Amino acid sequence: MTSSAANSNRSLSKIATKRLQKELVEWQVNPPAGFKRKVSDNLQRWIIEVNGAPGTLYENERFELQVDFPEQYPMEAPQVIFLHSAPLHPHIYSNGHICLDILYDSWSPAMTVSSVCISILSMLSSSTVKQQPEDNDRYVKNCRNGRSPKETRWWFHDDKV
Amino acid sequence: MDLRLEMTQARCSDLAATSSFYRLVYSEIEECGWERLIWLSDDLSCLSFRIMDKKKRGHILEIRLDKSYPSCPPSIAADVPHIFNLKWSTNSRLKDVLRQFSEHLEKLQGFWDSLENIDKCLSVVGLEQQSHANSYRQINIGNDCCLILNIDANDPRSLPECRFMGSDHLVNSFRNKWRRNNKKWSKDQPLSVNLAIILETRLPGPRDAERDDQKFECGICYAQFLPTDEGFGDKSGCRTDYTCENANCGRAFHSICVGEWLQSITTTRRSYDFLFGNCPYCSEPVSVRINTKCE
């Protein structure tokens, strides 16, 4: 596999490729409820449709997640962001970055794309207000150079939402 | 009649006194039989019924009633591969929905029989979580290869759509056999027999899978064998060689994978050649020796 010059990610390691193939099969056989992976041959970038769960603030809303896998997946967490337009949520920035510990410090190879998706949906579902994070504008401005959320030093100070 | 059902019925009966919509729903449930109702929302607009088919497989039918019911037909959902077109007229009632659903279930008996044959005779991945709606089966066919079948609900005994996953070499060989032999597919044979004929091999049974899965597959890279790669030194291509010592966990790993994981996080402690950290699954302490020659 060769990676194009435009693609800043290095191509997946053998271990990452094999593991992702298995995750993809598992996903196709048993996808998490409320999610749909857009058909694509790109194993390294998954685009996943999310449907807001019924009975929550996001009911009938549809979003898109972009999941990029690093060369050393699953030793390293995937990068997960919402594509435009991101849900209004106290832990989701308007540039799509998500403040959720398992995507950064608390990642473990025992997690999967599927379990990450479920965590994100559960984060949406438990929200009681539709509003941006308090520091949204400052944060988004700091990310203008295309910084990855994985380079952010996150504070997970609130686990209620 | 159990207590929960009695309470539902009582609540519904109280409501029936207050509006014509409630009265209608109450009487229509009565016709269907309270023992088949398993859930009812507070405003009586959502109902779930449990319906048994001829082979005693239980199915849940969810019905949603619009406020304009019965002039507007109810919407329905169920654990079936495809839902039927509800025939609805002004005289239709809930019992007609249940009857049409039962008829639909009968048409699908062959579909579920085919799937049951697969589940009983072959090594199916994730068997515990299958719903009646799922027409896909992932089947281990040995050597880290698997086959994904999609059974056609309308013609379940026909040659199913199929995909192979695994190493290129094996997958190609299976694909060739599939292409060469698929004319031998016979609708009179059970699916598991057809597969064995087409793939020219004895396929692993369900028992073989239990041994295979979590005991031998690495909880990190998901493979039984490491890739062959010089970087892994003498561990190249090796089987899982480390098991979490917590008896309740017992996940298998490649020591290389655990080592790489522990080296990638900051909480790991190191002493001489050993890394000390926690099992990614159960969080109990684990330690592995790392190959210092590779560094």
Image (spheres, rainbow, N blue to C red):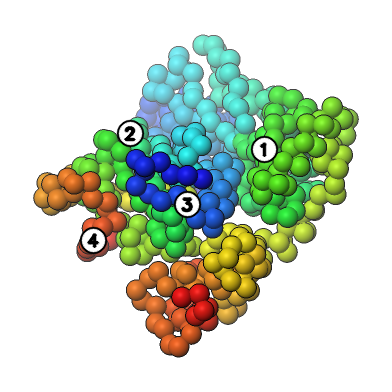
Give me the C-alpha separation between circle 1 and circle 4: 42 Å
Residue at image mark 1? B163
Give me the C-alpha separation between circle 3 and circle 2: 33 Å
Of callouts 4 and 2, the N-terminal one: 2
Which quadrant holds residue B183? Answer: top right
Circles 4, 2 touching at the beta carbon (< 8 Å): no
Residue at image mark 3? A12
Q: Amino acid at mark 1?
A: Arg
In this view, which residue lies farthest toward the left? Answer: A138
Q: Amino acid at mark 2?
A: Glu
Q: SS class of the residue under badge 3?
A: loop
Nearest to the eye among marks 3 and 1: give it: 3
Is circle 2 on the same chain as circle 1?
A: no
Give me the C-alpha separation between circle 3 and circle 4: 26 Å
Residue at image mark 4? A154
Q: Residue at x 66, y 68 (%)?
A: B239
Nearest to the eye among marks 2 and 1: give it: 1
Nearest to the eye among marks 3 and 2: give it: 3
Q: Amino acid at mark 3?
A: Leu
Q: What chain does badge 4 belong to?
A: A
Give me the C-alpha separation between circle 4 and circle 2: 27 Å
Residue at image mark 2? A61
Which quadrant holds residue B154? Answer: top right
Circles 1, 4 touching at the beta carbon (< 8 Å): no
Q: SS class of the residue under badge 1?
A: strand
Pick the front one: B128 or B74: B128
